Each structure stands twice: as structure tokens, then as C-alpha cells.
């Protein structure tokens, strides 16, 4: 085992421990509040908004809305109806996000054994997931930086029990 394997173990255990102490409810409130909440809502709108854009009554409604300014070339080229659609979708996703997080946190922070246990276990899983995502992002950024930094990291990961060298190579598309 190389030093990076020990670091990976420490990161995993640290994330799990932090997740158990903080809990899923508090972690979820933190990761879905503020700027994180807006980013999540934007991603959800981007992923799911295109699915419903031309489907059923939404597509018909957007067509009728665009017919309102059919004579105005600027508004037609700007696709104002799509902008309005995404603004309304963003507001709906924000409201649903707040309600869903409130329901989940109230359930998991209830004063009974099952809720407390579930809160701790899901908290450990959430923080482990976030820790892994951050670690993968760091590896990706080091791959983007490239040069001597990436070469030194690649050399340090050689012989890893967890095959971190292969992970770094695959995630960053960096070749020595």
C-alpha cells in the first residue's frame, strides 16, 4: 500500500464519521440550501426541462405564447416563451426542493430510534458520496493542470492497492 491508499482510507473514514455526527437531515439542509440549492435547481431544470419542452399541453402552451409576439422578430428569435418556461420551472423546482427537504429533515430528525438510526446511516452515506465526488473533482482538476503536477501524482499513485493510478488516468484522461 502506498501513502495515497492510506489517505483514501482516512478520507472515507473521515467522511463517514462526519456524516454520522452531522446526520442526513442537517447535511441535506446544508447541501440544498443557499447557492447549492440554486445550482441543484438549475441542473434539475436543465435535465428535466428539455424533456417536457415539446410534450403535450406544455408544447401547445408555448406555441400559443410564441404566437402572441409573432410579428416581433426580436422576441421570436430570442424564444421568449422558452425563457418564461424555464423561469416558471425554476420557481416550481425551488418550491418542491424546499418542501421535500423540509419533509425529509422533519422525518429524520424525529425523536425515535428508527429515525435517528436512519438519519445517522444516511448521513454517513451522504457525506461519503460528497467526499468521493470532491476527491474525483480534485483528481480531474490535477489532470487538467497536467505537467509536472500530474506526473508527480501519477508516480505517487503507482502500486496503489485500490488502483488509484488507474482511476486518475481514466478520470483525467492524462497519460504519462
Image: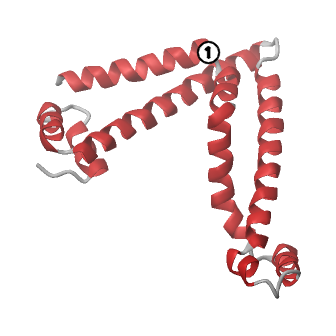
118 left or right of 135? Answer: right
Question: Could you tell me residue 11's position as x and y percent?
Answer: 38, 22
* Residue 98 picture quarter: top right
Regarding mark 1 in the picture, which secondary structure is present there?
A: helix
Residue 13, compared with residue 82, is above or below; it is: above
Task: Say which of 71 and 133 sits in front.
Answer: 71
Q: Is residue 15 above or below residue 91?
A: above
Dot 1 surroundings within 10 Å: few (below 14), some, or many (20 or more)?
Answer: some
Residue, disc 1:
22
Regarding residue 148, the answer to whether it shows in the image is: yes
Does residue 163 appear in this view?
no
The answer to whether 92 is drawn above or below residue 97 in the figure is: below
146 versus 116 height, above or below: below
Q: Compare residues 170 and 36 and report the one nearer the observer.
A: 36
**Horizontal placement of 64 versus 9: left or right?**
right
Q: Image quadrant of residue 34?
A: top right
For the residue pair 25 and 30, the one nearer the viewer reads as 30
Task: Answer with left or right where residue 25 lies relative to residue 84.
Answer: left
Q: Position of residue 122 (x, y in %)?
A: 62, 27
Residue drawn at (82%, 86%) of the image: 70
Left or right position of 100 against 19: right
Amino acid at each position: 500500500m502506498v501513502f495515497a491508499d492510506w489517505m483514501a482510507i482516512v478520507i472515507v473514514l473521515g467522511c463517514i464519521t462526519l456524516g454520522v455526527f452531522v446526520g442526513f437531515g442537517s447535511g441535506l439542509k446544508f447541501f440544498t440550501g443557499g447557492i447549492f440549492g440554486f445550482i441543484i435547481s438549475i441542473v434539475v431544470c436543465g435535465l428535466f426541462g428539455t424533456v417536457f419542452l415539446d410534450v403535450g399541453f406544455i408544447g401547445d402552451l408555448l406555441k400559443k405564447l410564441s404566437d402572441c409576439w409573432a410579428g416581433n422578430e426580436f422576441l421570436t428569435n430570442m424564444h421568449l416563451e422558452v425563457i418564461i418556461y424555464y423561469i416558471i420551472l425554476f420557481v416550481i423546482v425551488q418550491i418542491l426542493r424546499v418542501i421535500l427537504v423540509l419533509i425529509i429533515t422533519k422525518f429524520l430528525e424525529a425523536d425515535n430510534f428508527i429515525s435517528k438510526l436512519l438519519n445517522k446511516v444516511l448521513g454517513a452515506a451522504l457525506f461519503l458520496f460528497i467526499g468521493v465526488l470532491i476527491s474525483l473533482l480534485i483528481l480531474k482538476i490535477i489532470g487538467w493542470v497536467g505537467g509536472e503536477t500530474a506526473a508527480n501524482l501519477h508516480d505517487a499513485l503507482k502500486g496503489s492497492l485500490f488502483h488509484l493510478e488507474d482511476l486518475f488516468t481514466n478520470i483525467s484522461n492524462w497519460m504519462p
